[in-house]
Amino acid sequence: MQAQQLPSWLPVANRIVRTLHRIGLPLGTIHLLTVPGRRTGQPRTTPVSPLTVDGRRYVVAGLPQSDWARNARAAGRGELVRGRRRRDVTLREVADPDLRRAVMRAFPTEVPHGVDFFVRIGLVDRADPDQFAAAAERVAVFEVRDASARP
């Protein structure tokens, strides 16, 4: 399967999710990740759904060259918000292919409402952990750690 561009409805959906978060009404597992823009340094916010694998937290960018993924790569830090709770975090892109596959294999179980997005962009056909694991080389996976935690 070949990944496609973002669905046309995504910017509107992202604005709605950001607005609901700002008034204290988070949806499902969705958090807001704010990172400095790689060119302007201005804060850029996108909805993400962190998942936990072996006690560590990760976020996945279905399109590894999306603006938020490129900004996260460049900054290596950000702020993760859920409702009114804010945490400064560090972001490290996962290079280990085995770990990337493990994170992607867990995605349909940990973030079931996120499966449809990956289907719509053409990375998988359904919520099959094996399909998600096979797509691990076509996505960006970032480990998310509290900024105050030791490396």
Image (spheres, helix red, strand yellow):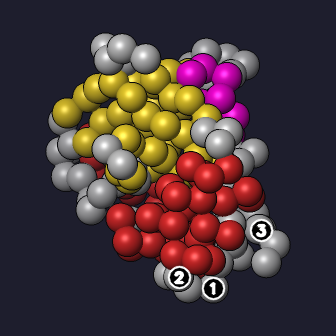
Tell me the amino acid under the disc marked 2: Asp
Q: In the rendered image, which quarter contains the C terminus?
A: top left
| SS type, badge 1 | loop
Question: In the displayed structure, would residue 24 be above or below residue 139?
Answer: above
User: Residue at coordinates 26% horizontally, 28% vertically from top-left?
Assistant: 86
Q: Which residue is mark 3?
A: 4
Q: Nearer the viewer, mark 3 or mark 2?
A: 2
Sequence order check: which comes first, mark 3 or mark 1? 3
Tell me the amino acid under the disc marked 3: Gln
Tell me the amino acid under the disc marked 1: Asp
In-front residue for pair 69/110: 110
The magenta span reads 67-76
Q: Main secondary structure of the magenta part?
A: helix
| SS type, badge 3 | loop
Q: Which residue is mark 1?
A: 125
- In this picture, residue 124 sits left or right of residue 83: right
- In this picture, residue 76 sits left or right of residue 23: right
Q: Is 103 in the magenta? A: no
